[in-house]
Image: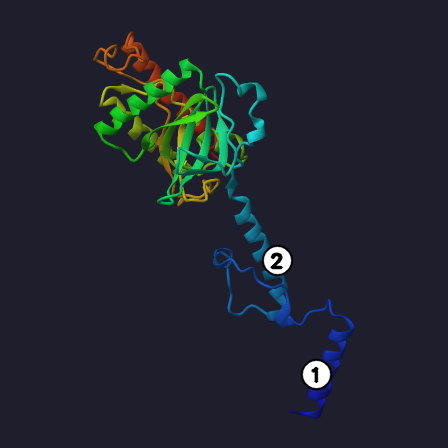
């Protein structure tokens, strides 16, 4: 090495010690660790080393863009349940971590409706996760829960379908002398209503088409078996994704998610008298109800279609 080059290297080292914010070329703008972001950036083997800083900024921007595309859903808080919903004929007081049904541990409160709270639970024996719909102790709602369970059991006997939520059974829970029932379902992701109203992102057209197709398959399946769901709405259209149940991306064409139709509490069968089989359900005006159900599908498709990008 020449004397001139050696002196230049010493000068460079001295400058870096005096001004540490001035990085060497090899240290300029560290690349993000996410390979997807890097792979999506254009590359040029003839790129000058002086442009590495601008490349790093572009990579960082691409990474931020990818992060923004993710839809994150926040589940409801247990404190959101009004205090007057507890007590006589009301919801049972359940805490996170409490054991229910003998072998199930409550992990997360997911929400509540008119007559039930929804919980994520884990079977302490086999480690499987379930979604529990735990009812009020009011006798009217007890009958409603039993009727829904009986109907779901009938659907299980008719055969399962990948776009229908899977029913796992019904469990009785006692709290302070009151009886509650827990309808047990497979653990899924957020419902479509949460996705539509908790995010400003638009669905990719391919994702929307896939969702509509899955909804129509579910409705076709139950209609061919003489079942009218009667409560088709975004809250009852559940997304089945990974175990990270509140983290999904619906803005990319290759996004994979399964849509499942849930909550058959208002459903009924056509063509048979249900007074002896399912006392809770009535079959009058079945033709009118079928038209109502078909109209509900059309309305939900239109609602989801609003999420298409302009």
Label 1: how many Cα within 10 Å (few below 14, some 14–19, many 20+): few
Mark 1 element type = helix
Gap between marks 2 and 1, in whole Å? Answer: 28 Å
The residue indicated by pointer 2 is: 57
Left or right of 280? Residue 158 is left
Instruction: Answer above or below: position of 128 versus 34.
Output: above
Q: Residue 292 in the image: x percent, y percent?
A: 35, 14
Instruction: Answer above or below: position of 184 versus 179.
Output: below
Instruction: Answer above or below: position of 15 versus 169.
Output: below
Mark 2 element type = helix
Left or right of 140? Residue 66 is right
Q: Residue at (69%, 87%) from the top-left corner? A: 5
Which residue is situated farthest in the front direction here? 177
Please name whichever residue, 25 or 297, is drawn nearer the observer in this view of the structure. Answer: 297
Q: Is residue 304 visible?
A: yes
Which residue is situated farthest in the right direction here? 18
The residue indicated by pointer 1 is: 9
Q: Residue at (64%, 91%) from the top-left corner? A: 1
Q: Residue 127 in the image: x percent, y percent?
A: 38, 45
Which quarter of the figure has residue 273? top left
Q: Tell me which colouring the rendered structure shows.
A: rainbow
User: Of marks 2 and 1, which one's residue comes earlier in the chain?
Assistant: 1
- How many numbered marks appear? 2
Which quarter of the figure has residue 289? top left
Q: Residue at (44%, 16%) from the top-left corner? A: 138
Which residue is situated farthest in the top direction here? 284
């Amino acid at each position: 090495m020449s004397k001139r080059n050696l002196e230049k290297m010493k000068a460079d080292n001295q400058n870096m010690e005096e001004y540490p914010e001035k990085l060497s070329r090899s240290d300029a703008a560290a690349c993000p660790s996410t390979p997807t972001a890097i792979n999506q950036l254009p590359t040029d083997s003839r790129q000058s080393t002086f442009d590495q800083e601008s490349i790093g900024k572009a990579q960082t921007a691409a990474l931020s863009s990818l992060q923004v595309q993710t839809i994150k859903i926040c589940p409801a808080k247990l404190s959101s349940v009004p205090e007057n919903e507890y007590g006589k004929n009301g919801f049972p007081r359940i805490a996170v971590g409490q054991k229910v049904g003998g072998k199930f541990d409550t992990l997360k409160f997911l929400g509540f409706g008119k007559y039930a709270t929804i919980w994520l639970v884990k079977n302490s024996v086999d480690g499987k996760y379930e979604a529990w719909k735990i009812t009020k102790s009011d006798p009217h709602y007890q009958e409603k829960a039993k009727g829904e369970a009986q109907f779901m059991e009938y659907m299980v006997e008719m055969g399962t379908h990948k776009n229908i939520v899977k029913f796992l059974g019904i469990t009785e829970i006692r709290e302070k002398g009151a009886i509650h029932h827990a309808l047990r379902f497979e653990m899924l992701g957020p419902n479509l209503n949460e996705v539509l109203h908790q995010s400003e992102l638009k669905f990719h057209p391919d994702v929307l088409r896939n969702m509509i197709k899955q909804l129509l398959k579910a409705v076709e399946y139950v209609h061919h078996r003489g079942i009218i769901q009667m409560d088709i709405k975004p809250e009852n259209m559940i997304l089945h994704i990974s175990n990270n149940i509140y983290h999904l991306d619906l803005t990319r064409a290759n996004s994979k998610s399964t849509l499942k139709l849930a909550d058959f509490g208002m459903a009924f069968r056509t063509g048979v008298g249900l007074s002896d089989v399912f006392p809770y359900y009535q079959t009058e005006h079945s033709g009118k109800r079928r038209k109502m159900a078909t109209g509900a599908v059309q309305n939900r498709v239109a609602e989801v279609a609003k999420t298409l990008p302009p």
